[in-house]
Amino acid sequence: MSDPSHESPNQGLPPGIPAPPPPRPDLKDTLEAGPTYGSEPRGRPKKKRKKERTHPTDTYPPLKKSRGWGGCCGCLAEFFALALLLLLAGAAVVGWYGPGRFVSDGYTVVNLESEDAAVAIAPTEPTFYLAPGTLHYAAPVTKVPVAFAGRELRIEGDFHEAASITGVKVTVTETSRFAKDLEVIAAEFTDLGMTLKGELSGRVIKNLP
């Protein structure tokens, strides 16, 4: 009995006719076949998957606030609101420390219309002098309470009762003597050597000399 494996490939065909070629193997294209054993095929970039939210309580980084026009407008609004409050407060303070306080205390208010006013005669009743510019008070003896307010004040003389001076620049000369309390509210206060037996009160930003 013959072994079929040793038979000629053209067995069964007439002599002289070649045998047909063997069939081509069924080879698969690995690039088109997709992943094998869970791995991506070579030569293809891996696709990044978006992170999905799995639970409503997942934590996320806080959002950064915009620093554009909205933030600037908010800062400007706060600044103008603060400025308005300061103006209102300043008006209330001036109203109290100005004529309002002295009128309630019974002082007579004297409005000096001149930008450069001078007073050489002492009043006979408590008086508040209000000057729009400068005021030079030089009455020799003042026996009643007095108060002064203006941009620039120069005060001298003897004062038997309490005195109050409010101004941007306040100067009290060496010939000034105060038997009782003195109040000074000024941005710049110059004391040239006054005599004060009472207490000095008020608010001063800069003392000279």
Image (cartoon, grey):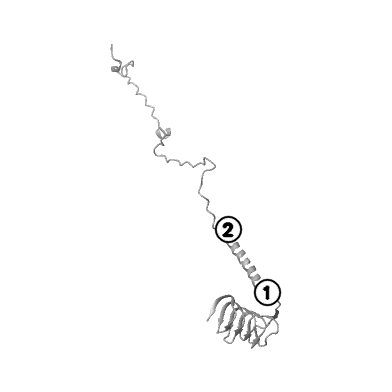
Q: Amino acid at mark 1?
A: Arg
The numbered dot on residue 101 is: 1
Residue at the disc numbered 2 = 70
Q: Seen in the image, is 84 located left or right of residue 67?
A: right
Q: Which of the marked residues, 2 or 1, is nearer the chain's N terminus?
A: 2
Q: Which residue type does callout 2 highlight?
A: Gly
Residue shown at the point (62%, 64%) measured from the top left: 81
Q: Residue 182 is drawn in which quadrant?
A: bottom right
**Residue at left offset 60%, top offset 85%:** 177
> What element does badge 1 sit on?
helix
What is the count of numbered marks?
2
In-front residue for pair 5/162: 162
- Where, quadrant-wise, is the N terminus in this rendering? top left
Mark 1 Cα shell of 10 Å, populated few (<14), some (14-19), many (≥20)? few
| Position of residue 134 measured from the top left corner of the image (x, y, whole percent) | 63, 82
Q: Is residue 112 above or below residue 9?
A: below
**In the image: residue 41, left or right of residue 103:** left
Residue 18 percent coordinates (x, y): 32, 21
**Residues at circles 2 and 1 in contact by the CB criterion of under 8 Å:** no
Q: CA distance from mark 2 to mark 1?
A: 44 Å
Q: In the displayed structure, would residue 48 be above or below residue 19?
A: below
